[in-house]
């Protein structure tokens, strides 16, 4: 693999670009779905009449749903809205909202209002789906008067709330997605300075950047890939979002596959502990993990490979003990 460092830079950039474009595209999609909400919030409420309401089959195909209605008469109804929990018997005394009926000849529409609000023939609110329980009660109470049932519109006016809550939810979600876009995108601009790129920052910890880069590129000619992971004669690289895991093979103390028998549940991860006590997780397929675990001992035969509960207890309590053992094994073969 020629120019291995260039390949690693492209991989990190690709992951970060995906992380940038993902939230941005999602924000655009949400904005498209909420375009009608934005339109109604900016230009509404729209004064509409009975003809417009009668032309709507449902509230979902209404381009104007934040509306102002006016009728010759509004009458109270026996229905109220009571917040209840599952299995709880509704108590009308706890009702916070009432249902009135606005007459717009020849149609009528249910109106949801705060319980203490005075009834008015001029109302503003958003058209919403009619509650099934309310519709069922209304049809039962008027089963002997089918004309009244036919006159009722298949939706209702929620005059107790405006669009502020809906707009706030949209704004919070959109802002969060744009913030995520900025969080992922700003580093891409910073990385225009080559020294600030995660690949170069990861390589600098091994010494002079130019010399290490030249070494990595020369070893790239015989490098082997295990999914996104790359194994060379001296290094193991794994590109991640906004960073590069770079491990010098001689620094490996212990490597093992994570599975249900280990302390970690994810079965497709490879855990590597290095002599500085740091932990690296390589997330590749099970097959690639098996291939990589069989290749690592050839590069560093002195390290420990495979999970062992005794090694785990030793590493947790006295990690330097394992480091010293690996060094002793290396010195014994020197």
Image: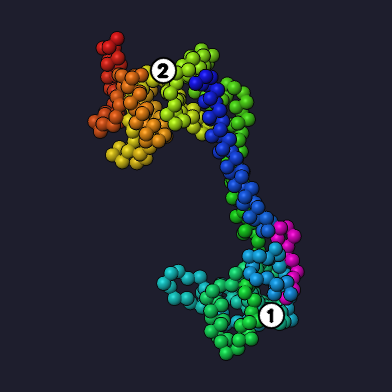
Foreground: disc 1 or disc 2? 2
In magenta, the rendered stretch is 39-50
Residue 125 appears in the figure:
yes
Residue at image location 27% in from the left, 19% down from the top: 325
The residue carrying mark 1 is: 107
Q: Residue at coordinates 43% horizontally, 69% vertically from top-left?
A: 86
Q: Nearer the viewer, residue 10 or 168?
A: 10
Residue at image coords 30%, 14%: 330
**Which of the pair 70/15 is nearer the observer?**
15
Residue 258 in the figure: left or right of residue 140? left
Label 1: how many residues lie within 10 Å, few (<14), some (14-19) or many (20+)?
A: some
Q: What colouring does the structure picture have?
A: rainbow
Kind of element beneath mark 1: strand
Would residue 184 be visible to someone looking at this image? no
Q: Which residue is mark 2?
A: 233
Q: Position of residue 146 (x, y in %)?
A: 60, 86
């Amino acid at each position: 693999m020629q120019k291995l460092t260039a390949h690693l830079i492209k991989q990190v950039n690709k992951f970060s670009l995906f992380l940038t474009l993902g939230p941005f595209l999602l924000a655009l999609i949400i904005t498209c779905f909420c375009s009608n909400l934005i339109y109604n919030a900016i230009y509404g409420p729209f004064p509409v009449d009975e003809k417009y309401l009668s032309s709507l089959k449902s509230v979902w195909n209404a381009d104007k749903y934040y509306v102002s209605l006016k009728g010759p008469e509004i009458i109270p109804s026996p229905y109220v809205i009571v917040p209840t929990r599952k299995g709880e018997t509704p108590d009308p005394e706890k009702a916070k909202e009432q249902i009135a009926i606005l007459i717009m000849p020849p149609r009528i529409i249910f109106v949801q209002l705060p319980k203490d609000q005075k009834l008015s023939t001029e109302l503003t609110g958003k058209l919403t789906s009619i509650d099934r329980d309310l519709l069922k009660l209304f049809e039962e109470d008027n089963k002997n008067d089918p004309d009244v049932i036919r006159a009722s519109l298949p939706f209702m006016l929620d005059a107790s709330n405006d669009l502020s809550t809906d707009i706030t939810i949209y704004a919070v979600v959109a802002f969060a997605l744009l913030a995520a876009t900025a969080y992922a995108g700003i580093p891409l601009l910073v990385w225009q300075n080559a020294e600030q790129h995660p690949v170069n920052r990861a390589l600098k910890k091994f010494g002079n950047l130019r010399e290490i880069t030249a070494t990595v590129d020369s070893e790239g000619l015989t490098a082997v890939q295990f999914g996104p992971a790359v194994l060379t004669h001296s290094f193991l690289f794994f590109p991640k979002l906004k960073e590069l895991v770079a491990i010098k093979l001689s620094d490996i103390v212990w490597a093992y596959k994570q599975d249900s028998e280990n302390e970690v549940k994810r079965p497709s991860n490879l855990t590597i502990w290095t002599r500085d006590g740091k932990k690296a997780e390589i997330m590749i397929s099970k097959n690639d993990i098996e291939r990589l675990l069989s290749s690592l001992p050839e590069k560093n035969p002195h390290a420990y490979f495979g999970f062992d509960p005794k090694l785990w207890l030793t590493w947790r309590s006295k990690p330097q003990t394992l480091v010293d053992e690996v060094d002793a094994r290396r010195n014994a073969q020197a």
